[in-house]
Image (cartoon, grey):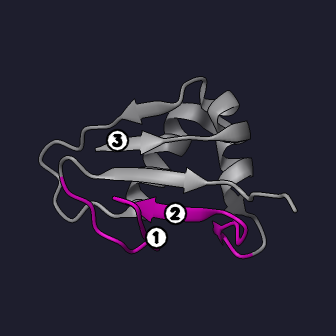
């Protein structure tokens, strides 16, 4: 599966996307992918994505899988694209 990053998260990760493989694992969820990305990119990634008070994803981030809104429980399969969308300002 592919994870895509924008804005500050792209700077933290150092690229616009990353391909992850979960060999011999079934039922991969968004939560599992975020956990793997945290292992790969450390504290800066975790601080950006997770709300330390609720231990969940920060409320201002939107998670999409294949361009559809997703939660940390959403299951992924080979070829899926996960996108972490930062807050967008403007007017």
| Up-down relation of residue 24 to residue 53 (above or below) | above
Name the secondary structure under disc 1.
loop
User: Does 20 lie within the magenta span?
Assistant: no
Mark 2, residue position: 63
Q: Earlier in the sequence, mark 3 or mark 1?
A: 3
Give the number of the disc on residue 52.
none
Asked whether 3 or 90 is in front, the reply is 90
Mark 3, residue position: 2
| Up-down relation of residue 77 to residue 71 (above or below) | above
Q: Whole-percent x and y of residue 64? A: 46, 62
The part of the image, by quadrant, that contains residue 59 is bottom right
User: Does 61 lie within the magenta span?
Assistant: yes
Mark 2, Cα crowd under 10 Å, few <14 / some 14-19 / many 20+, is many
Name the secondary structure under disc 2.
strand
Mark 1, residue position: 72
Asked whether 26 or 83 is in front, the reply is 83
């Amino acid at each position: 599966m592919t994870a895509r990053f924008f804005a500050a998260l792209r700077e933290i990760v150092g690229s616009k996307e990353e391909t992850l493989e979960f060999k011999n694992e079934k039922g991969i969820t968004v939560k599992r992918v975020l956990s793997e990305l945290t292992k790969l990119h450390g504290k800066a990634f975790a601080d950006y994505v997770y709300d330390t008070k609720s231990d969940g994803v920060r409320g201002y981030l939107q998670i999409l899988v294949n361009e559809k809104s997703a939660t940390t429980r959403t299951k992924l399969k080979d070829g899926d694209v996960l996108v972490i969308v930062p807050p967008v300002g403007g007017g």
